[in-house]
Amino acid sequence: MLIFPLMNDLSRKIIHIDMDAFFAAVEIRDNPKLKGKPVVIGSDPRKTGGRGVVSTCSYEARVFGIHSAMSSKEAYERCPQAVFISGNYEKYTAVGQQIRAIFKRYTDNIEPMSIDEAYLDVTENKLGIKSAVKIARLIQQDIWQELHLTASAGVSYNKFLAKIASDYQKPRGLTIILPDEAEDFLKQMDIAKFHGVGKKTVEKLHQMGVFTGADLLNISEISLIDRFGRLGFDLYRKARGIDNSPVKSNRIRKSIGKEKTYSKILNLEEDIKKELTLLSERVALSLQKHEKSGKIIILKIRYADFSTMTKRKSLSQKIQDAETISQMAIQLYESLTDKDKDVRLLGITVTGF
Ligand code: TTP
Ligand code: MG
């Protein structure tokens, strides 16, 4: 039974670009001695007493099973000869901006997803080039010739497929998925690789016997919606190569903030501080994604009686990282007079970009 009509917009030309081993590639470029070696971006566990996590690593290091978010300690155990380098986020942000400038030669319709990844809608583009594949290739060439870095590109008629395509033949890949290829492409895919499907959803899908795109095709729309709500609606369509979501170019943002309403009232100082730390991480991620940093931090608190207050602090330097944001937010919280009131909402905003 079909609940909602299936509409598939095939009129667009979407490119997804993702840099190859981004942080590691920048370090190797800037220190050619590292070329061909297993390079891990993360603090050296021998110098930190075993602490630290891997941000990313070169493809040579991936052969040893090292990957992002693994502990540096485990990376070292897997490959003692690996070169460990602590990241230089400022440098990577600057390179990210250079990459963005290259995209802008072709279109302003760019949706950055992270420091090294973006969607481009090139249906209409500044150079009037008809072939999206050609644009993708030109962008890869520009990035290589000007920045000495490599990118992988995916081309298709929507974001979902373009993203899958860019990941398909890394590094230096260029993959195109045409409308009549989409379903076959998706059938063989591991469900865990469907973008937007988190760990918990994957577990539930496995319980339903869904391991691949082909398995997903067997589940009715109504059961997917029953089980997963909006996500189920989207999944039913994604399995069929349908994703009409637009490329959302960066609005001019004046502030970036996150807030959360708690279903269970918070009243312990330590719980509130913990939540502020979590919110700070989300704000920092968003700031980094949008390449913003700001000099003003605002804390918002709504109490159980719905009274709401905000408190702001101006800083001497622009901030972007989770640790500083949470320190500042906690300072603001500590400066409050009525700390023993029950809290139902917390929010942190960074502005003054
Ligand atoms: P990714 O694009 O996920 O990884 P990558 O570019 O290093 O490698 P790939 O060739 O597979 O695309 O992330 C981009 C950068 O973001 C990465 O170089 C480092 C950083 N990053 C982290 O710091 N922590 C993480 O857990 C991940 C996934 C990425
Ligand atoms: Mg990448």
Image: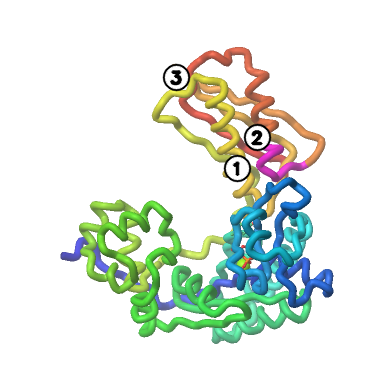
Which residue, given by chain and number where applicable, does mark 2 sit on? 326
Whether ligand 1 has any atom under 8 Å from the Cβ at mark 1 is answered as no
Q: Where residue 281 sits: x, y (%)?
A: 60, 42
The residue nearer to you, when weighing 31 against 26, is: 31
SS class, disc 1: helix
Task: Left or right? Give the position of 322 relative to 343.
Answer: right
Question: Which colour scheme appears in the figure?
Answer: rainbow
Vertical relation: 63 (above or below) 318: below
Residue beneath the point at 51% across and 65% down: 247
Under mark 1, the amino acid is Glu
Q: Which mark is residue 304?
A: 3
Q: Marks 2 and 1, Cα distance to the nearest angstrom?
A: 8 Å
Q: Tell me the quarter of the picture where residue 99 sits.
A: bottom right
SS class, disc 3: loop
Q: How many other residues sit within 10 Å of disc 1, few (<14), some (14-19) or many (≥20)?
A: some
Looking at the image, tell me whether mark 1 or mark 3 is earlier in sequence order.
1
Q: How many other residues sit within 10 Å of disc 2, few (<14), some (14-19) or many (≥20)?
A: many
Residue beneath the point at 69% across and 74% down: 105
Look at the image and give the residue range highlighted in magenta: 318-326
Q: Do residues under tags 1 and 3 come within 8 Å of each other at their CB atoms?
A: no
Mark 1 or 3, closer to the camera: 1
Of the four image quadrants, the one with ligand 1 is bottom right
Looking at the image, tell me whether mark 2 or mark 1 is earlier in sequence order.
1
Under mark 3, the amino acid is Ala
Vertical relation: 35 (above or below) 199: below
Q: Marks 3 and 2, Cα distance to the nearest angstrom?
A: 23 Å
Q: How many other residues sit within 10 Å of disc 3, few (<14), some (14-19) or many (≥20)?
A: some
